[in-house]
Amino acid sequence: MRQGSKVLLVMLVALLALSLVVTGCGQKKEEPKAQTPAPAPAPAEKVIKIGFVGPLTGDVKTFGESTRNGFLLAIEQAGGKVGEYKIVHSIADDRNDVAEAVNVATKLVSQDKVQAIVGSVTSKATIPISEIAQANKVVQISSTATNPKVTFDAGKRKDFIFRACFIDPFQGYVGAKFAIEELKAKTAAVLYDQGNDYTKGLAEVFKTNFEKMGGKVVAYEAYQQQDVDFSAVLTNIAKMNIDVLYLPDYYQKVSLIGKQAREKGIKAPFLGGDGWDSSELDFKTMEGGYFTNHYSPDDPRPEVKAWVETYKAKYGSVPDALATLCYDATKLLLNAIEKAGTNDPTKIKEAMQATKDFKAVSGSLSFDEFGNPIKAAAILQIKDGKQVFITTVNP
Amino acid sequence: MIHFLEQVLNGLQLGFVYALIALGYTMVYGIIKLINFAHGDVFMVGAFLGYFGFTFWGLSLPSAVLLSMTLCAILGITIERIAYRPLRYAPRIAALISALGVSLFLEYFSSLKFVFGPNFRVVSRPITESRWDLFGLEITNIQVLIMVVVILLLVGLQFLVYRTKIGTAMRTVSFDHDAARLMGINVDNVISFTFGIGSALAAAGGVLFAIAYPQIHPFMGIMPGLKAFTAAVLGGIGIIPGAVLGSLIMGQVEILTAAFISSQLRDAIAFAILILVLLIRPSGILGKTGPEKV
């Protein structure tokens, strides 16, 4: 009996100690949260700290480099100042690796005490960063992460997180609209990879909208990523006399499908998404095909012209979509900071959400309730072995 | 009806290419009871060599095919010499693991920048494609080319195995290594020769594949290799006509399923048929039933 009560006492003490530790932890965690928004007490100069995260090494290194170029150019153009705040920026490399993304984001938030983050490039790295940014109330804008989960997860809008690119399904909608209105298509065939969310998403949205706008999808066929023989479905499609063939996959696969489609006598133009945007696309086969993209350097709008010239002068090459979107993302952030007139992330976030018809390079832009931009998409055509700008399609 | 025949033709094209790979699996299995998992990668190397031949080295198509076949035969013999011969009397699982190792080595070594490189390459065909209309039936010269080349190779193989001295030796070795050795047959040489022939056929298949589906990369051999292996098992592994029959069935099932049933179920139905056949005839369609020889 005595033994029993002794054990009980020990357990009780242990429980108390544990609860102390737990609450202690909770308090500790909240401390930086409370501190971060408070402006640094620098009497001489007002400072806004912006962090950049991108894959500067690793498998998508070129994406990261272009993106960083866009970021630096936007800050340089602003003269390193926004409103009466001086911009202090730090650059971090996530190597397109989830663990590394968490590390550098944590460092930016807790050590460098940034008020805003621009980045990252891929959805894979951006999603974990968005969790950290949201928890610490730091504004984040990603230039190219297209996964819906970046700004919205588990039924909750992460209200500090935004992005400058449209999400995947939007391209399916634009493709359908372009096919109906510009190509005057009445019938379409769709081929998609049933194991890939990107192509599946585009295909589904294309089909729904194409039929809603009065067209008819006569063939809706799936394949596997490893498939190389599409003769069966293409022979069927060749008999159907379609007006457009929608191929929402990456450049390698569409090149292969396109070749076989022509062999089977399909003469309809091809249509696709931004997965086509590569110098390794089989331009000869895809000649005459159209695809939706974020932006085209040949777009005649003055914003685009000015941007292409500035970029060329600084880096000596035509800016790709990645550099452009990050330039837009950074400009959007600076615009929101200026509107808010403060470096308080909560105020900046509100100003960002309220952005209306911002004249970005990739199109006039407003945010929807999920932090996704509502803006036009560019339609490009493969012509004489080059990408040629055709038109923009508004949402 | 014409439409159906056109699909059958598509299936034949696919089936014939599978057959060239399946033959290598089945011959090697027949002779040393090893599933040579590196075979699909030899097929890949063959495709690349053929592509280099007619794109960069200025060879005509037939000489590119022959060169690719020769080099792959040497590759096959080397693989056997290095990775399988030392393990011939080890437990069978050891050779199987070694085969997997060779397969991964070939894939990743080829992916290196100074070998073939990791990128997809678009193959520009050495022949201009044209289509003929036979009473409403559309047929391309690529399809004709594949069928003619494969049938020629099959006839050649049949002659080799049943009408020549080395063929007789191969068949003897496949029955019993020790007895063959007692008959004065150099078993090691015969096995090397079998690997060489199997790899050369795979190389020819690779070049034809690269022409028919003009895109190549270091991992292109995995899926066709797997399908061809399945076809060899379906026809009865170790039996040469079985490999061809199994491949033709695989090709037809895949194409006809995608064309007339559902493109989503293509592989599901193909493999369901495999399971059904094996349930009814565990040793394959042409496989010998009855007790295993001792």
Image: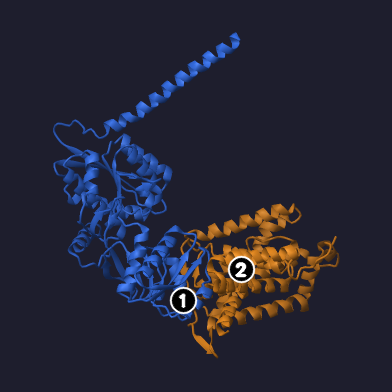
Chain colours: A blue, B orange
Q: Locate residue B20 relative to residue A368 in the image: left or right.
A: right
Quarter of the C terminus of chain A within the rendering? bottom left
Position above or below: A128 against B73: above
Please, which chain is the residue tagged with disc 1 on? A
Mark 2 Cα shell of 10 Å, populated few (<14), some (14-19), many (≥20): many
Q: Which residue is mark 2?
A: B72
Distance of label 1 from label 2 (alpha carbons): 32 Å
Image depth: mark 1 or mark 2 in front = 1
Residue at position x 35%, y 57% in the image:
A167
Q: Is residue B75 visible?
A: no
Question: What is the x, y in percent for residue B196?
Answer: 67, 68
SS label for mark 2: helix
Report the amino acid beneath label 1.
Ala
Position above or below: A95 against B280: above
Question: What is the x, y in percent for residue B33?
Answer: 74, 61
Q: Which residue is mark 1?
A: A261
Q: Quadrant of residue B256?
A: bottom right
Q: Locate residue A106 relative to residue A80 in the image: left or right.
A: right
Please, which chain is the residue tagged with disc 2 on? B
Position above or below: B198 against A136: below
Q: Which mark is residue B171?
A: none
SS label for mark 1: helix
Question: What is the x, y in percent for residue A150?
Answer: 36, 49
Decide which of A74, B134 is in the foreground and name it.
Answer: B134
Mark 1 Cα shell of 10 Å, populated few (<14), some (14-19), many (≥20): many
Q: Residue furthest bottom?
A: B135
